[in-house]
Image (spheres, rainbow, N blue to C red):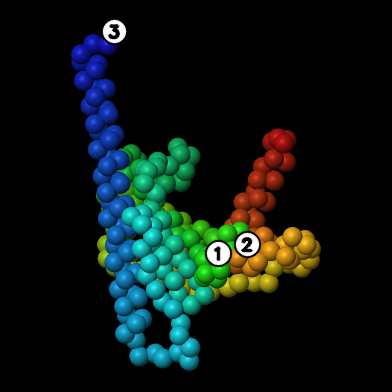
Amino acid sequence: MMEKNDTNELFSKIIRKATLKNDVYHNTYKTFHKFKTVIKEIVREYQETDFKPKRAIPFEYKNRGEFEVELKFAGDILVFIMHTNVFEFSRGHEVMKMPYVQEDKDRSYCGIINIYNFLGDSFKYKRVNDIGYLIGRVFINKDMHYFIEGKREIGFLYTNFANAFMDDNASRDIIKSSISYTLNFDLLTPPYETVKLLSVHEIQTTLDNMKMKTGKRLGFKFQADADEEEQAVKSKQVTGSE
């Protein structure tokens, strides 16, 4: 039977861990609302700009719920999604080797905000088979410090984790960088081999329900993804594993 002192120690651990995760959650939630505010501000600035395009070009904010917000501009959509859970990095992750984290292991617990890029037409025409791309994810800890994993303009190395504090300026930089990356992330013609066959069913189906996927890099791979696969193959060759 557990002694009272042992029980109190258990309760203390529960309270401590729950308090830590609550702190991280609230920082992530606060950051997500900063993102919403910044997106609204940028949309307002666009609407007030003196630039007059030949045809109307959308630049719109859409609140998709408590943990999801959408920014539509030109032919693209960025969807920001806050995960409601708190995560810790694996022991082998480079973040865990940082002095900043080794000084206080609680700093390794983070909330996550994912940033996805979709084609505007995928939503407009309800092409449910179209795909979006995770272009970045923002990690926020109990100290309101953050770092980003992402593609080109979005991401920067985790080594900034010790000094990068999430404030209004950082939020604005992240949103602007996400827009900038998306503008340079163009829709490429898919390889001929991936689209040369079309079934009778597909051609008879309306556009809204068409089974042909559309994505900016459908049939292509990010270089980082290709490098990871190449490294995995080399690892298997060395270990002899299947």
- Near-viewer residue (69 or 146): 69
- As helix, strand or loop, the secondary structure at mark 3 comes to loop
Q: Residue at x 60, y 65 (%)?
A: 208
* Disc 3 residue type (three-letter): Met
Q: Which mark is residue 209?
A: 2
Q: Is 73 situated left or right of 42 in this image?
A: right
Answer yes or no: do the residues labelled 3 and 1 have beta carbons within 8 Å?
no
- As helix, strand or loop, the secondary structure at mark 1 comes to loop
Q: Residue at x 21, y 20 (%)?
A: 8
Task: Tell me residue 158's x, y (percent).
Answer: 42, 54
Q: Is residue 218 visible?
A: no
* Disc 1 residue type (three-letter): Lys
Instruction: Tell me the residue that label 3 is attached to.
Output: 1
Of circles 3 and 1, the one toward us is 1
Answer yes or no: do the residues labelled 2 and 1 have beta carbons within 8 Å?
yes
Instruction: Tell me the residue that label 1 is attached to.
Output: 126
Q: Is 212 situated left or right of 181 in this image?
A: right
Label total for image: 3
Distance from disc 2 to disc 1, alpha carbons, whole Å, reads: 7 Å
How many residues crowd mark 2 within 10 Å: few (<14), some (14–19), many (20+)?
Answer: some
Classify residue 195 by image quadrant. Answer: bottom right
Distance from disc 2 to disc 3, alpha carbons, whole Å, reads: 62 Å
Q: Residue at x 68, y 72 (%)?
A: 189
